[in-house]
Amino acid sequence: MTSGGELSGRDPRSYLFSPGTYRNFILQADAKLNAIGDSGIVLHATLQTGVPKGYEVQLCNTGGAPPQTGSLYNFRRIAKSTIADGEWSRHTIAVIGNRILIQTNSELHVDYTDKESTYTEGHIALQQHDQASQVNFKTLRIKTLPDDIVTALEGLEKVFPSLAVK
């Protein structure tokens, strides 16, 4: 934790897990990466040693090859990030049933339905990828949503405005 209240990660790969588990929710987090930064937010993560299983929202602006920031790792790839290194970006993520939405700085990148329902509940884990990466998080907010899918979807276009124009 920095003096400004940010969570800061550097050094070998590690994960910071939420104390509780979540099924349906909306998560908002601000993140900032260095020039070769690679990080992620793992959704429905299993609490385990090593790399947790779950859906990973990729955070990688210019370092490495795709997938880039806003991708749903192993499911939906974003080829080029619009986020500059060293710049704060706001990530709004919704998981409702088997549907995952990822929005970065008000731009919807992913609206994905996992027909296999691979992961249905778990922790949220913030990833520190490697020694060369520096990641900072701030303003982490989570809103749990009802288990009933229809009720959980109500008002989603207020959080993801581009859904209202579909």
Image: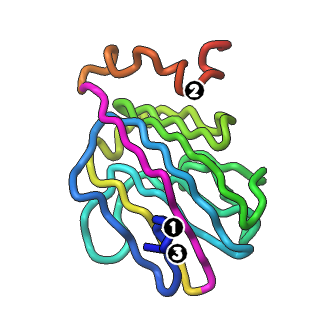
Seen as rendered, the residue at the extreme front is: 3
Using residue 56 as the reference point, say whether residue 142 is left or right of it.
Answer: left
Indicate yes or no whether the magenta region holds residue 136: yes
Specify start and end residues of the magenta stretch as a single range: 132-146
Residue highlighted by disc 1: 4
Image disc number at residue 66? none
Q: What residue sits 68% from the left and 73% below the top? A: 34
Q: Looking at the rendering, which quadrant does residue 49 occupy?
A: bottom left
> Which structural element holds mark 2?
loop
Q: Secondary structure at mark 1?
A: loop
Q: Amino acid at mark 1?
A: Gly
Q: CA distance from mark 3 to mark 2?
A: 28 Å
Element marked by disc 3: loop
Q: Is residue 90 left or right of residue 141?
A: right
Magenta stretch, main secondary structure class: strand
- The percent coordinates of residue 81 (x first, y second) are 75, 53
| Mark 1–mark 3 distance (CA, rounded to whole Å) | 22 Å
**Residue that label 2 marks:** 160
- Which percent across, then down, holds residue 101? 52, 35
Placement of the N terminus among the 4 image quadrants: bottom left
Could you classify mark 2 by the number of other residues whose Cα lies within 10 Å: few (under 14), some (14-19), or many (20 or more)?
Answer: some
Rendered view: 160 above or below 79: above
Task: Say whether disc 1 or disc 3 marks the residue closer to the N-terminus.
Answer: 1
Tell me which colouring the rendered structure shows. Answer: rainbow
Q: Amino acid at mark 3?
A: His
Q: Which residue is mark 3?
A: 129
| Callout 2 touching callout 1 (CB < 8 Å) | no
